[in-house]
Amino acid sequence: MPCARLASCWGGRVLPLLLAYVCYLLLGATVFQLLEKQAEAQSRDQFQVEKLRFLENYTCLDQRALEQFVQVIMEAWVKGVNPKGNSTNPSNWDFSSSFFFAGTVVTTIGYGNLAPSTEAGQVFCVFYALVGIPLNVVFLNHLGTGLRAHLATLERWEDQPRRSQTPSPPLLQVLGLALFLILGTLVVLIFPPMAFSRVEGWSFGEGFYFAFITLSTIGFGDYVVGTDPSKHYISVYRSLAAVWILLGLAWLALVLSLGPLLLHRCSQLWLNGRSLSLKDRAAPDPQGLPRPQKMPISA
């Protein structure tokens, strides 16, 4: 009997979900390969051409020396040192940058462009993440709960009978909830990318891409704020970005919980409208007689 239940559960729920999951991964792999493989090959060929051109211009260097120099650059990049500029570049471990890094650790974003290089820093990062990640989850849950409670208070205030002793129409509730979500999305996902684009010199598409990749905790690390050595940032720039990340994550948690509620309200509104239209069709004549049916006109 338990084996039969397990087989029915596997065949009825798990197996279709597993197939959909694998198919989605295969679809993503195919699309990314078609879009990115050719660009990667072009970049690789261009890099080889630039290396040969560099050796031609500086004949005192050989291929081995150049490869060693490239290796030094790669190691510096892995440790968070930008090869562009000189030693006067801003530190990656000043307080503002360290605060930004701490935020990426507890939110599990992990851009990958910066990591502790000392053994003590790596050990501290492990224990810091063990405590900080659950703390971040609890904080975001409580913040989202507080926002939902505030929204519920507004809805109860709207649902109170007015002077005419009639509750507020469901349409106003749906519109209010939709307006709340739209304004929050503008504040979290539209205005910050515009600011990042202006400060970093990105396009709006690149800024929006950075915002989405960050708030979804994917964190590729191809776009990171405050890392261009040719720009002069304010001292709290990356700290403000960390605060935006925390608020944005809380907002996304709220949206994920309110999205089904909005869809439910819309479906209720549609069903109510449909039921009212059906009642109007079936309503009797004001004199108590059924409405006459239309007879076809004979030719």
Image (cartoon, rainbow, N blue to C red):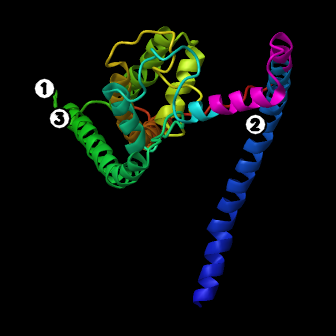
Q: Position of residue 251 (x, y in %)?
A: 37, 34
- Residue drawn at x 63%, y 67% is 14
Q: Residues within 10 Å of mark 3 (few under 14, many from 20)?
A: few
**Residue 103 visible in the picture:** yes
Vertically, is 52 above or below 161?
above
Q: Which label's residue is closer to the chain start, 2 or 1?
A: 2
Q: Position of residue 128 (x, y in %)?
A: 34, 50
Element on which disc 1 rests: loop
Looking at the rendered image, the disc whose residue lies closer to the viewer, 3 or 1, is 3
Element on which disc 2 rests: helix
Q: Position of residue 233 (x, y in %)?
A: 40, 12
> What's the amino acid at mark 3?
Gln
Q: Position of residue 214 (x, y in %)?
A: 49, 33
Q: Which residue is mark 2?
A: 32
Which corner quadrant of the image does residue 165 belong to? top left
Task: Specify start and end residues of the magenta stretch as a single range.
Answer: 52-73
